[in-house]
Image (cartoon, rainbow, N blue to C red):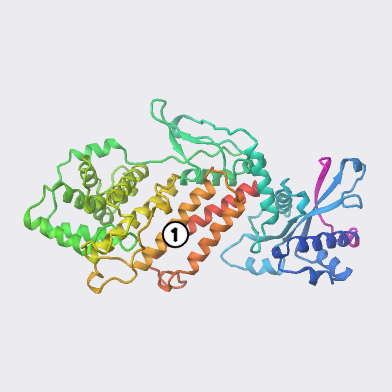
Amino acid sequence: MDCNTDFNFFRISKTKDVATSARKYRDLRLQALQASPASFSSTYETEVAFTDDEWMGTLTSPGRETFICAAITRQDQNVQQFSGDPAKWVGQVTLRTPSSPECSEKNMDPGNDNERWQMLSLFTCPEYRGQGLGKRLCQEVVDFIRGYRDQPKVAELSLIVKAHNTAALIEDSRELHAQRTRKSQRHFYRETAGSTLNIPQLGSSQVASQNDTGEASWFQVEDVSILPIYTSEAACTAFATQLCQCLEKPGSPKPHISRWNFIDESILNHSLNADINWPSLVSAKLLVKTALGHINPGFHLALKKDTIDVLSSVYQNQSFNDPVLKCKYFALFAIGQVYSTQHDLTNASTIAGTTYFAQSLNLLQVIPERPSMTHIESLLLLAYFCQFLNRFHSAYLLIGNALRVGLIAGLNYNIPQSHRISAKDREHRVRIWWSIYVFDRFWGSKSGFPVQIHDDDIHVDLPSVAVPESDNDQFPDGAYQIATIELARITGNTTKGIYGRARFNESFLQREQKLLTQLKMWEESLPEHLKLHLGTANPKHVVLMHLQFSFVGFRMRFLDLNALLTFEF
């Protein structure tokens, strides 16, 4: 392609030179249907038979606006109107306005006062791709919507993409990726006082060229004497900052990274000096049942019935000084207490159960050379409680410890049938391992950390859907556990495939589309009792699972639009 080519972007007039515009639009549209037949709901065979009047009717149809990218060489600079003969139309996108039949039905929603717009049929000629023309066409649409009314009104713009309709954007993405790799990698060390991280505004080309999601490493520094804390762009705090940056209005203050309030070590050290003993047996059972009732069936962290039975034997045998049992049950007491105590909103530094948690955590100082399942359970229970303290870095460390202890015990392998171990204990090993896996993927993704073990290193079976009737009171729903494991696997792949900085053979859009397809297949394959049902109350654990599903999908969709289209509203 000649580098001395200029591009002009404009909306086709519905009253001026309509016949000429219709002929040029017909040629571009038929070329699009031949170049990318899978990208459109119509076909070349259908539209090549259209009459001139039908093509003009398409352009003048109420509720539809058509935007064009026209190319012209520098030698024809004397041409005043790019819509004239010297200009070649090389790209187009269609906009459905709020008055169109497709949008007007949605605009009748009484609970939503926003105007609905739809953008579709985005196409650029293959020989002109890789220059961001699709993005600039979309920006032309956004500018039109901004000036549509004298009085501003909230508008919702949707990009309608047919399955596999990613040809133009993929080509743009590849070229932008190539531009990035030709640049030297740049790392920015940003720090400000008071744990505020100012993120500089990025222009359209900058955002798109920075490995799709960005090349800069973010560090938070509260004090020059404290080790800087790395903030991955996959972390919730960084994601929220990027979202605010995308939504902010021109001239508004630059968004800073969210401050992370947590219960610090001074409070935990103070809790160690507190005089706390085992509660009465009745209170202990209530706390443990409360804890397990909220943990299950979301996660399997302990055998439910055995945990209650062993608790009774602790009181019967007065085994209160056994450090392994004390660590586990104090962690359960902490979780039970936080779920059964009303939180004091006026005092954020006081979290129910913190004293039990600190005492339990203190018992992990000596790492056992031959770990037990109880020790692994304690690590997971303590990691679970860390979320109430907002100590997600501590949780990540505890999960990592549980993972490595699990590797020592070979939990990532099936025990041969020749080993004499009960079916209950076999299933317990399996489910404990997969709980570690789920924690690692879910919480690692929210903090932006890479997975701590790869799927290729896991050789253990999935949890059993049907367990013996005698063990029904030990294990939560196996189907729920399997669905959660698969969602965790997709979540881990998202962290690597979307936010990773490795060199990929596939483009960003191709990786994103593959992951979105996996999410759709996951949702469609759910058993009926794990699907969300409108008009009825859904179980809490089912709602939480679907919230995680939506969280993963939303982050990818946001990056898709932010990195590739880069609208600046």
**Above or below for 109 versus 550:** below
Q: Quadrant of the N terminus?
A: top right
Task: Report the residue at 63% width, 39% height from top.
Answer: 180
Q: Residue at x 61, y 53 (%)?
A: 509
Q: Residues within 10 Å of mark 1 (few under 14, many from 20)?
A: many
Q: Residue 421: name its quadrant.
A: bottom left
Query: Circle 1 — which element?
Result: helix
Residue 293 located left or right of residue 545: left
Pick the front one: 478 or 564: 478
Whether residue 459 appears in this view of the structure is yes
Residue, disc 1:
487
Task: Look at the picture and state if 355 lies above or below 511.
Answer: above
Q: Residue at x 34, y 64 (%)?
A: 463
Q: Is residue 196 visible?
A: no
Residue 386, how many percent across, how many down?
32, 47
Residue 411 on the magenta segment: no
What is the residue that sits farthest to the left in this orientation?
317
Amino acid carrying label 1: it is Leu
Percent x, y for residue 428?
27, 61
Percent x, y for residue 373? 23, 53
Please give left or right for residue 295 compared with residue 117 in the image: left
Q: Is residue 207 found left or right of 382 in the rendered image?
A: right
* Residue range of the region highlighted in magenta in the rendering: 1-19
207 over 546 or under it: above or below: above
